[in-house]
Image (tube, rainbow, N blue to C red):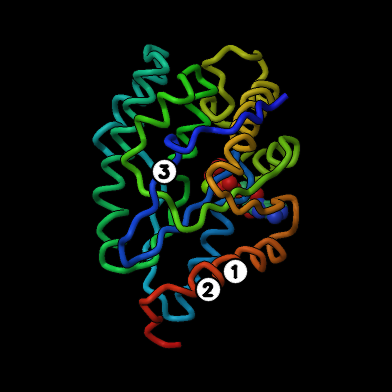
Amino acid sequence: MPNTQPISPELTLKPHDFPGRLIIVEGIDGSGKSTQIRLLQRWLESMGYRVFFTEWNSADLVKKTTKKGKKKRSLTPTTFSILHATDFAHRLVTNILPPLKAGMVVLADRYVYTAFARDTVRGCDREWVRKVYSFAPKPDIAYYFRVPIEVAVKRLTQSRQVLKDFEAGMDLNLHHDSIESFRIFQGRILDEYDRMSAAHDFSVVDATANIADQQRIVRTVASKKLANYSRKPRIA
Ligand SMILES: Nc1ncnc2c1ncn2[C@@H]1O[C@H](COP(=O)(O)OP(=O)(O)OP(=O)(O)O)[C@@H](O)[C@H]1O
Ligand SMILES: [Mg+2]
């Protein structure tokens, strides 16, 4: 059963006052985040918005260490969490803040909520993880693509054939079969996203719907939230 206890307000992110706008996507693996944010990017660009896209792929700074740690299973959840936070801080400073300060629309494929969910499921204290990331600005829109595990499993196995050990949570020894392990691990991540949803103002999208229908909802939300954005598109 997901825990639906509210999170105290001091553990939520603070809104920013940069001239740009920050739009992020979250959801379990295979929920369709990348598909939707790429479509949103093209649509915003077609209207003349200056858009900058960034995704949570480890920077060189910590890539080697986390890779080694994953292979040898030698890192504790806390060490892992700090490494990821370092990686995120690097991404924030180099990829997110400069375009945001320059007044662009920044689209981020995964944000701190990924760490909130993953690190908690891996055994870190929920409040501690939020405090670690308290330097991150609150996004103007946080889409949460909500999908049942079975739909995600189907999409990922159809598109990639094999699930990566880490996204299946194989290092947690939940189950010897990777699909079964994925179900358990991603199920816990899903519960974490659900409990975050209200406190962090997620715009929840039913990610079982088809791609076009979801994109229509995504655009409607974006249009509303960009209504007070002072940087008008180059071509309107
Ligand atoms: N609404 C949809 N209906 C059916 N298939 C979809 C839908 N959205 C995306 N897909 C397909 O599901 C697969 C996973 O989609 P996508 O890569 O966008 O997910 P993701 O959330 O970014 O996953 P990851 O967390 O692994 O990066 C892709 O093959 C994509 O084409
Ligand atoms: Mg993706």
For the residues labelled 2 and 3, the Cα–Cα distance comes to 28 Å
Q: Decide if ligand 1 comes within 8 Å of the CB at mark 2.
A: no
Q: Mark 2 points at which residue?
A: 43
Q: Are marks 2 and 1 in contact (CB under 8 Å)?
A: yes
Look at label 1 and name its amino acid. Arg
> Where does the image place residue 8, in percent across and percent down from the top left?
50, 33
Q: How crowded is mark 1: few (under 14 residues within 10 Å), some or many (20 or more)?
A: some
At label 3, the amino acid type is Leu
Of the two numbered discs 2 and 3 on the same chain, state the one appearing first in sequence.
3
In three-dimensional space, the C-alpha distance between marks 2 and 1, rounded to whole angstroms, equals 8 Å
Closer to us: mark 1 or mark 3?
3
Residue occupying the point 69% across, 51% down: 207
Q: Name the residue under label 3.
A: 13
Residue at numbered disc 1: 219
Q: Which marked residue is nearer to the observer: mark 2 or mark 3?
A: 3
- Residue 71 % position (x, y): 41, 18
**Image quadrant where one finds the N terminus:** top right
State left or right for residue 234 relative to residue 144: left
Residue 110 pos. (x, y %): 47, 46
Q: What element carries label 1?
A: helix
Identify the residue at image location x=53%, y=73%. 43
Q: Is mark 2 on a helix, strand or loop?
A: helix
Residue 175, compared with residue 52, is above or below; it is above
When the figure is inspected, residue 205 is found, relative to residue 63, above or below; the finding is below
Q: Quadrant of residue 199?
A: top right
Amino acid type, label 2: Trp
